[in-house]
């Protein structure tokens, strides 16, 4: 019989809490300062992208070993 992966479930709950907290912060910011909130709405997509684990983000094909030094 398969066992539950409680660590995975905990991580999902933590991410959900973090997302909800960020949305609440943005709502409060929008309520306090409507003009500044328009600029922060663009940052929501960046915050969501930061929550994605590094394994699922594809690295560019040309960046295999790091920076390449050339002698000029």
Image (cartoon, helix red, strand yellow):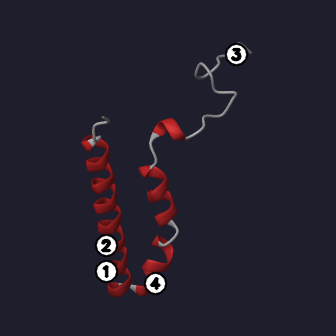
Q: In the figure, residue 60 lies in which quadrant?
A: top right
Structural crowding at the residue carrying mark 1, measured as other residues with C-alpha within 10 Å and reported as few (<14), some (14–19) or many (≥20):
few
Residue matched to label 1? 28
- Residue in the picture at 42% in, 86% down: 34
Local secondary structure at mark 4: helix
Numbered circle sitting on residue 58: none
Mark closer to the chain start, 4 or 2 = 2
**Dot 4 or dot 3, earlier in sequence:** 4
From mark 3 to mark 1, how far is it between C-alphas?
50 Å
Q: Which residue is mark 3?
A: 70
Q: Position of residue 10 (x, y in %)?
A: 26, 49
Quadrant that contains the N terminus: top left
Q: CA distance from mark 3 to mark 2?
A: 46 Å
- Which is more toward the observer, 9 or 25? 9
Q: Which residue lies most toward the top here?
A: 71
Q: Position of residue 38 (x, y in %)?
A: 49, 79
* Residue that mark 4 sits on: 35
Q: CA distance from mark 4 to mark 3?
A: 47 Å
Residue occupying the point 69% across, 29% down? 61
Foreground disc of the pair 4, 3: 4
Which of the two discs, 3 and 2, sits closer to the camera? 2
Q: CA distance from mark 4 to mark 2?
A: 15 Å
User: Which comes before the other along the chain, label 1 or label 4?
Assistant: 1
Determine the secondary structure under disc 1.
helix
Which residue shows up at 28% across the image and 56% down it?
13
Tell me the residue that label 2 is attached to: 25
Identify the residue at horizontal 65%, vertical 19% (top origin): 68
- Asked if disc 1 and disc 2 are in contact, CB closer than 8 Å, the reply is yes
């Amino acid at each position: 019989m398969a066992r539950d992966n409680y660590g995975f479930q905990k991580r999902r709950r933590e991410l959900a809490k973090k997302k909800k907290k960020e949305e609440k912060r943005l709502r409060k910011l929008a309520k306090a300062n409507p003009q500044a909130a328009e600029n922060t709405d663009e940052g929501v997509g960046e915050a969501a992208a930061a929550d994605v684990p590094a394994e699922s983000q594809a690295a560019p094909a040309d960046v295999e070993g790091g920076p390449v030094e050339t002698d000029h």
